[in-house]
Structures are given as structure tokens and as C-alpha cells.
Image (cartoon, rainbow, N blue to C red):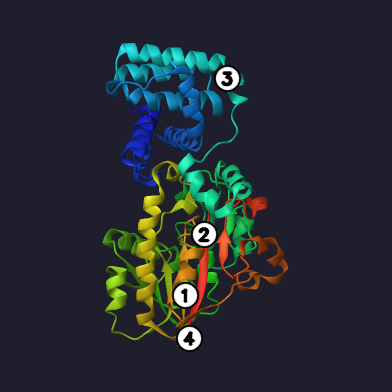
Amino acid sequence: MSDPRQTAAEMLQKILIDKAFFSDIKNAADSLAGKDASFANMLVLTALRRLVFLKKVLKQYAKKKLPEKAAFAEYVLFLGLTEILFMDTPDYAIINSWVNIAKRKTDKYVAGFVNAVLRKACADREELKKHDFGEFFTSEFYRILDHAYGKKTVSKIQAASLKEPPLDITVKSSPKIWAEKLSGVLLPTGSIRLKNSGKISEIEGFESGEWWVQDAAAALPVKCLGKISGLKVLDMCAAPGGKTAQLINEGANVTSLDISESRLKKLRDNMLRLRFNEPQTICADGIEYLQNYKGEAFDIILLDAPCSATGTLRRHPEIVHIKNTTDIEKQVKLQQALLNAAANALKKDGVLLYCVCSITKAEGENQIQKFLEDNPLFKLCPLNAEDICENDNTSKIEEIFTKEGYIRTLPFHMSEYGGLDSFFIAKLRKVA
């Protein structure tokens, strides 16, 4: 039988060495028994959220970098310290388990070192906790945000990002009824928020296709479009299909485009579960498709552009440790090319809705400002609370709208409900 702790250490190593996304490697934990899988996943995610602090703690006990042959012990120690400082496991179970893993994966001398460090940390636990100031961002990531938002806002982002996010779903219809049925909370924007526990596939309504998982922030772009029944809509970068499902549910004539055939298959599978007619799907490079488009122009192009994904750091704390300014600059160039290509396939008076799950302004506010300066064919359609929720709830979401008329959600927004992923949305109209 696989050891959940060893699995967790191997996952953490893969994330930090290979810059892998947690979602891409969590199948390693999913192969474990139910509770063991949950434990391994929680262990890795907690360590990633607390890694900046854990590195400082480890430095107190390990003055020198471990030799290459003992490198695995570093991940053992990070996770052992995670259990000591942030979880309720008894000390003897922590020490014995991690020492045995170190012995298996390295040698008895390294295991002895792991034993000494963990015993000392157990003894020093309360003193160590006094020096935990809720650090989450690396110095490089902090610089990215500080430049855009300032220290006060960054501090609020950091505090909100340390908390495990809830599970949001979008329902086909009757959100009030489904919120009651699932003991969830109906958000002002129409999403239903559930406690993030148990298998998603076992929640009522999943098998019958009544809803799909979609963060409340990610559900906002389609809501900004208003009435779209019968309109011809291109959903760019569409997989795995959350926005496609929303568009179909609102009666739009949808074409879903993505560069990955495997991701489009996932989209088609999701539409099948939801009992929706399969939309037209196209596997193509978005820039080439738009530049060479010869068909009937679209009423709406929804461009959920490829981005740094830094907006999902509550769910993917590894992003803080594997993304840098170079990644952001690369995505900015791709986004510019997609935006510039979109005009060719859009009708006059058509809508280009641009969104990214990025917290960086380079991919959001600055990107659209530059596009509008370079493209006089387009004008900004300012968004407001009435566009996305009922009037009696508008005051609860005013904070997500910028003075320019964009939507910019941050992790501490709607904090009374448990926060949001970071998202940017701009609605543009082709005027000539």
C-alpha cells in the first residue's frame, strides 16, 4: 500500500523542481485510498501556502544546503514541519513516519538528521509560531503585486490567499432551490457556494447534469453579456467548458475553439453530462483561426485568454513559487496577438469580451488600455453591478468594479462569503 506522506513529498518535489501544476500531478494522491488521498493533498497544499515561512524555519536548523543525494530530505522536512506547525498530528507519528521515509529514500545518516530537526521543531513549536507573520508571497511575486497594488492591498491579498477556498457551482436553473437542497449559500452574483469537502461526483445533481463546478469570479464574464439567446458566439480558449455551458444555457449559438484536442474532448464530455447539445468545436490556434476567418461574422467573441493563471493562487498556491515576470511577459504578447486578431471575425456593433484569471494588471487593465489606444474601431462598454446581479444585491459587489468600468476581483473581495479568485473582465464594442 502506498504511503500518503511519501506520495505527498514526491508531489511537492515535482512541483518545485519541474514547476508542475498541482492539478496535473494530484492523480498521484488520487490513487490512494479516500482519506489518504485527502490527507496527501491537504499536506501538499498547506506546505505550498506556508512555504516561505517553512524555509525560514528550516534555515534555523539546517545552516547548509543538503547535498544532492540527500535532496529528497528537504521535501520530507518541509512536510514534517507543516504537520508540526499547522496540523493536529501527534508528534510521535510525525517524527516516526518522516524518519522512516527519509531512511527509505536516502540513507540512515540523513534520516538521523531529519529526526533531530523534527524533534527540535516539536520542542520549539510555540516559539516558532510567534514568528509566523502569514507570509505567502515570495520576494519576486511580492514585487509583481506591490508595483500594481501597493503594500496595503497586497497585505490583504496575501491574508485572503492563505485560506482554503470554498467550492462554487453554476446551476442551469432555480439557484435558490439548489442552494437550499445542497445546504449552500446563494451568492449575490447567482453562483452557489458549497463547503469544499467530499467527492464532487457524489454531490446531488452532478450525475443528472444540473450544475457544473465554476468559481464565482469565472462565472461573471458571461453574465456581463446580457441577453444572448440566438446570437452567434465564439468561445475562445473554451475548454474545459464552463463558459460554453453558460452560453448554451442562455440560448446562444456557440462555437467553442481551443488549441488542445484533449481539452476539447473534456469539454464535449462535460456538455454530455450536462445534457446540452454538443456545440460546434474547433481545434485550432486562435490567432490563425481569427486572422484567416472567412465565415459569417460573430455577434460576440468571448476571449478567456491564455494567461499566467496567477488569479487562481488560492486554489493553486504553487503558482507563487513557479511563476515569474518572464511568464507574465510571454502571456502578455500572446494576449495582444489574440485581441488584435479578434476584430476580423466580429460583426460591426459586435461585442468582444476579454477576460483573464490573472491578478497582474499587465494582463488586465494595462492590456486593454493599450488595445483601445491602438484600435480606434473599439470602445469600452463600462460594466456595473446591475449587469450581473439583482438590484437588491448590488451594494454587496460594488468593490469588484473599477472606476474605468472594468471588473477586477481580488481574493479578499466578497470576504463575508469566503472571497473570490482574481479575475479581470473588460467589455468592448466594435463601433466601425
Instruction: For mark 1, give the secondary structure.
Output: helix
Question: Which one is nearer the viewer's eye here, 329 or 405?
Answer: 329
Q: Earlier in the sequence, mark 1 or mark 4?
A: 1
Residue to which mark 1 is pinned = 373
Tell us which disc is closer to us: 3 or 4.
4
Q: CA distance from mark 1 to mark 2?
A: 22 Å
Asked whether the beta carbons under mark 2 and mark 3 sit within 8 Å of each other, the answer is no
Q: Amino acid at mark 3?
A: Arg
Asked whether the beta carbons under mark 1 and mark 4 sit within 8 Å of each other, the answer is no
- Judge whether 65 appears above or below 405 on screen: above
Q: Position of residue 36 (x, y in %)?
A: 43, 32
Quadrant assignment for the N terminus:
top left
Question: Which one is nearer the viewer's eye here, 257 or 405?
Answer: 405
Q: Earlier in the sequence, mark 3 or mark 4?
A: 3
Q: In this rendering, does residue 276 appear at all?
A: yes
| In the displayed structure image, the side of residue 101 where residue 205 appears, left or right | right
Q: Earlier in the sequence, mark 4 or mark 2?
A: 2
- Tell me the tag on residue 423: 2
Asked whether the beta carbons under mark 3 and mark 4 sit within 8 Å of each other, the answer is no
Q: CA distance from mark 3 to mark 4?
A: 63 Å
The residue sitting at 59% across, 29% down in the picture is: 132
- Tell me the tag on residue 431: 4
Residue to which mark 3 is pinned = 125
Q: Amino acid at mark 4?
A: Val
Q: CA distance from mark 1 to mark 4?
A: 14 Å
Q: Amino acid at mark 2?
A: Phe
| In the displayed structure image, the side of residue 18 where residue 350 appears, left or right | right
Q: Earlier in the sequence, mark 1 or mark 3?
A: 3
Q: Amino acid at mark 1?
A: Glu
Question: Which one is nearer the viewer's eye here, 295 or 399?
Answer: 399
